[in-house]
Amino acid sequence: MKIGILTGIWFVAEKASVLQSLERAAALGFHYVDLHGVFHAGPQHLNEQQRRSLKSEMNALGLTPRNYVLHPPMNITAADDAALERCYAYMTEGIDLAVQWGIHQVMFNSGQWVYGLDRSTAWQKSVRFWQRVCDYAAPRGVYIAQETEPYVWYLVNDTASMLRMREDVDRANFVTLVDFGHMALAREGPEHLALLADSIIHAHFSDHEAFRHTNQVIGTGITRTADYLEALSRMNIDAHMQRFGYDELVISFELGVPGDHVADPDDWVRRSLQHVQQVAPYMSL
């Protein structure tokens, strides 16, 4: 297992561009990065020149992009037919960019429940949307990785709903990104990871207050980071990565929530790295 980082921390703290954030990640010694398409690396954020040059810029910095965080531009369960098509077009454009940049996995969340819309209807709407996205991604060699969002208004907010969505979408390239902090907020212990072992493609370190999604410095919240890492080690998770064409699992830091003050993002990263390597000395960049 290796440690990576999501580029969003520098956007949250300083409104940094994706290139500026990549430069900061490289300066801190990282090799693996997640591009934050919601904040500053999505199709709407980059012009054609920036899109074309990003891969060579990452190569020059010695960075390997492992994961692309790309959510639809609106809640798909609330979208009418025209808006849903725009969401689909946005996701397919993002998949094409991922391929261009050498990324083989795109991460998303499944949407939120909507007042006045029957829950079964909302669920099936999400299922059909992600089936279409998976069918577009599959021949391009891209996996679609769902992540839980640990609040009741999200369709997929715990392991049980994640497994149900995976079963209903029923696509071989529909896989799982586990976030330790999201599991902690959902009150799910490390034992739940075994239920997802055959589909985990990526993971996130995050830490939070007991009742608020805060993405604070790792080791300062409720997340049992050491226990989740130990569970993955017992599962021999790196061997599972071979099915996706990887040698080992990458677990990336997700730090900082928009609206909260981050005075020194590099310090947040260093303190988080120090904690992880204290509780799991076998983890490295």
Image (cartoon, helix red, strand yellow):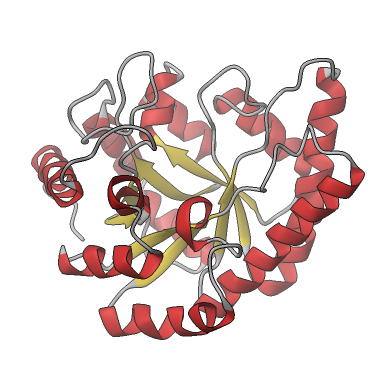
Q: Position of residue 150 (x, y in %)?
A: 50, 24
Q: Residue at x 61, y 40 (%)?
A: 109
Q: Nearer the viewer, residue 244 or 80?
A: 80
Residue found at x 61% / y 48%:
71
| Residue in view at x 84 percent, y 22 percent | 120
Against 33, is 155 above or below? Answer: above
State which quadrant residue 142 falls in: bottom right
Please state which of residues 184 and 35 is positioned toward the viewer in this rendering: 35
Task: Please identify the quarter of the rendering in which residue 211 is found.
Answer: top left
Residue lying furthest right: 81
Residue at image location 70% in from the left, 30% down from the top: 164
Marker count (numbered):
0
Quarter of the figure with residue 3: bottom left
Q: Position of residue 209 (x, y in %)?
A: 30, 19
Q: Is residue 64 left or right of residue 198?
A: left
Q: Nearer the viewer, residue 75 or 259?
A: 259
Where does the N terminus fall, quadrant-wise?
Answer: bottom left
Query: In the image, 116: left or right of 188?
Result: right
165, above or below 107, in the image = above
Q: Position of residue 151 (x, y in %)?
A: 54, 20
